[in-house]
Amino acid sequence: MYGMTKRQFELFEYLKARDARGELSPTFREMRDALGMRSASSIHYMVKALKERGMIDYIHSRARSITVLK
């Protein structure tokens, strides 16, 4: 799982699937709901961890700008 937690891996797989379908990047709420979580801040920390691992990238000043790199 690339040294990720189970939840980070689930989020990464969700992002990869959306990217493969050509869909817009999900909002934090959409990610939260897809993983069945209650806190959007938890999603923020997971997105940050995936970015630090080089799995995704995003532009802070743009909404829906997550790009899957690996």
Image (spheres, rainbow, N blue to C red):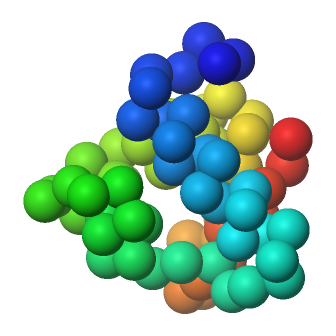
Task: Identify the residue at horizontal 39%, vertical 77% (top origin).
Answer: 30
For the residue pair 3 and 21, the one nearer the viewer reads as 21
* Snapshot quadrant of residue 3: top right
For the residue pair 37 and 65, the one nearer the viewer reads as 37
In the rendered image, the quadrant that contains the N terminus is top right
Task: Identify the residue at horizontal 55%, vertical 71% (top origin).
Answer: 60
| Image: 26 above or below 39 | below
For the residue pair 35 and 28, the one nearer the viewer reads as 35
> On the rendered structure, is 52 left or right of 70?
left
| Image: 3 above or below 18 | above
Task: Identify the residue at horizontal 54%, vertical 78% (top origin).
Answer: 26
In the rendered image, the quadrant that contains the C terminus is top right
The answer to whether residue 61 of the structure is visible from this angle is no
* Snapshot quadrant of residue 5: top left
Image position, residue 24 (x, y; %): 69, 86
> On the rendered structure, is 30 left or right of 42?
right
* Snapshot quadrant of residue 35: bottom left
| Image: 64 above or below 28 | below
Task: Identify the residue at horizontal 74%, vertical 56% (top origin).
Answer: 16
Image position, residue 68 (x, y; %): 78, 56
Q: How many marks?
A: 0
